[in-house]
Amino acid sequence: MGRKHFEIESLHGETIENLIELKNTIESKYSRVFLTVIIMRYFNKSTPEIMAFTGLSNPTIVKYIVDWNRSGLKAIVDHRGGSVSKLEPSIIDDIVYVVNNKTPIDFQFTAHTWTCALLSYYVEQTYGITVCQETIRQVLLSKGISYKRAQPKPTKADIKEQEAFKKNAKSTEYFRVFI
């Protein structure tokens, strides 16, 4: 005999019909799945059945039920992180322009090459917006720019591969832009 599964203690003033309607109209995938778990457990579906239907793990299902019993509808809000980009398109365009056409020396920095950390500091100094290095890296990657790393140049490399690579790369002094 298995362990007794967690039960829905209360609907917190909601009706099951309202929860089903909310599940069908809400845009957040997290909230839809959360409500699906609550509705299925309300109708006495077992944890393995819920796991098979939603693709969630047992601990996640238990967490959803415990959170629902504690907080009700407040629990369906997704607090897992992620953020809206603080960088406007004009700032992104400026970062790309700076990377392709300027050096850190032009902005009185002591470094001779751009790094994501230095670009993050540049954005903070210029626009007053604090962004992390990873955000800068993602912006550069989304614009087809990757940081150059020291790469070996074997003397016996395939000439056709070298030419194909050169055709698709527009190099700037510190970054490589793939077309």
Image (tube, rainbow, N blue to C red):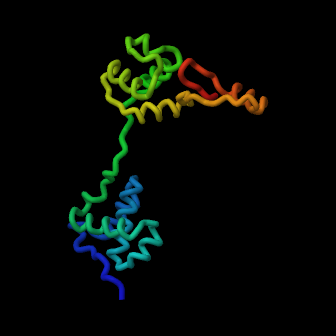
On the image, which quarter does residue 153 sit in? top right
The answer to whether residue 154 is above or below residue 78 is above
The answer to whether residue 2 is above or below residue 97 is below
Residue 135 coordinates in the image, percent (x, y): 41, 34
Kindly identify the residue that appears in the image at 44 percent across and 76 percent down.
49
The answer to whether residue 97 is above or below residue 89 is above
**Can you name the residue that lies furthest to the bottom here?**
1
Task: From the viewer's side, name the closer residue of 156 and 10.
Answer: 156
Task: From the viewer's side, name the closer residue of 64 and 170.
Answer: 170
The answer to whether residue 118 is above or below residue 4 is above
Q: Is residue 33 left or right of residue 97?
A: left
Residue 77 coordinates in the image, percent (x, y): 30, 54
On the image, which quarter does residue 152 sit in? top right
Kindly identify the residue that appears in the image at 59 percent across and 26 percent down.
177
Residue 164 coordinates in the image, percent (x, y): 73, 30
Q: Quadrant of the N terminus?
A: bottom left
Task: From the viewer's side, name the closer residue of 64 and 99.
Answer: 99
Kindly identify the residue that appears in the image at 36 percent across and 58 percent down.
31
Kindly identify the residue that appears in the image at 43 percent across and 12 percent down.
105
Residue 157 coordinates in the image, percent (x, y): 74, 32
Q: Is residue 128 left or right of residue 98?
A: left
Q: Is residue 22 left or right of residue 147?
A: left
